[in-house]
Amino acid sequence: MSAEEAVIHRGLDGVVVDTTRISKVMPEINSLVYHGYPVQELVELCSFEEVAWLIWHGELPDARQHAEFQAVERSQRGISDDLLAVIRKIPRTAHPMDALRTGVSFLGTEDLEMDKIDAEANLKRSVAMLAKIPAMVAAFYRLRKGQEFIPPRQDIGFSENFFHMIFGKVPAPEVIKAFDVSMVLYAEHGFNASTFTTRVIVSSLSDIYSGVVGGIGSLKGPLHGGANEAVMHLLLEVGDPTHAKEWMLTTLREKRVVMGFGHRVYKNGDSRVPTMTKYMHQMADFTGNKKWLEISDILAATMIEQKNIHPNLDFPSGPAYYMMGFDIDMFTPFFVMSRITGWTAHIMEQQANNRLIRPLSQYNGIGERRVVPLKQRG
């Protein structure tokens, strides 16, 4: 095919670039599956730790494997004094995603076996990042408020430990369950922008930390992970359920972008939304604050009525996190805490059968011309 005949797929829309065994959106059942298991079943029957094992190993753990994995993950939750010192030096005005990107990059410098890039070594690094990233997030969360870092505990689960490091206490089981559900739903989603970024980076045989740092950079954008933050800012702008419908109608008339709606993959609604919406409702019931739920319901109904565009996962997760008591700009780091599982699984899958990812482009610039010496250019 000549350059003139090349078909341009902007944003790689519709282009299949490789195969993966990790996850798939199955239109026939309108469900996202991890290694064949529908996520709506996983959230009800499995913990996030079990799902992390599944994403890396392809099967759910048995009782022995689960116990051993828990022991390993819990033993690695601490971060070094040097890494904590780096986080202390980050300006308090920085976005938490910038702090997390820096923290993971520094974590890579502490790895004394960087020459080992086999699957076993990278799986160990993946578990370590799963264990340590929550501590990095919690450290920056507290330090920027003038509070001291709370070290992790090893006697409680992943989600319980994170709340302990943030607030100094473990909340009610209803809150833990809603947070854990969000971790499962955000864990993996095929060749999304950040996952593809990680695969591109490691396809050059770069290291796993570089891939993850690239993923964090991609996820930070409001068209990807940052959308959950934007959703909550949107709800705060609306302010009251009585204003919600008119706000949406006005926004659509003005052709403004409404974050939290639509998805490149899902055409009939994000299959994860009903599950997360259920737990957003439970958070509203638990806190007694129904305002954000009511605004969300009106906005979603109006958007579907006017444009037939459905909410995506960020739409219910943003207000759910807000009702848990978290600062809005921390929502995307929570995404990282979960998606580290999917990213690292894809990194290992890429390196198992690697080919440098190097697409072509079609040049549409100026044709060949001659250089005029500086003294002749006037």
Image (cartoon, rainbow, N blue to C red):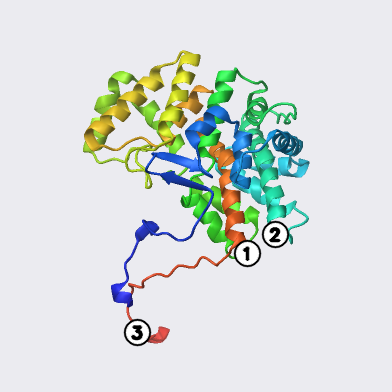
Q: Residues within 10 Å of mark 3 (few under 14, many from 20)?
A: few
Q: Residue furthest top?
A: 288
Q: Amino acid at mark 2?
A: Ile
**Depicted 339 relative to depicted 365: above or below:** above
Q: Residue at x 38, y 47 (%)?
A: 265
Disc 2 marks which residue?
A: 117
Amino acid type at circle 3 is Arg
Q: Answer yes or no: do the residues labelled 1 and 2 have beta carbons within 8 Å?
A: yes
Q: CA distance from mark 2 to mark 3?
A: 46 Å
- Identify residue for label 1: 205
CA separation, marks 3 and 1?
38 Å
The spot of residue 273 in percent (x, y) is: 41, 32
Of 332 and 273, the residue lying toward us: 273
Tag shown at residue 213: none
Secondary structure of residue under mark 1: loop
Q: Which numbered disc flags the more N-terminal residue, 2 or 3?
A: 2
Q: Which residue is mark 3?
A: 369
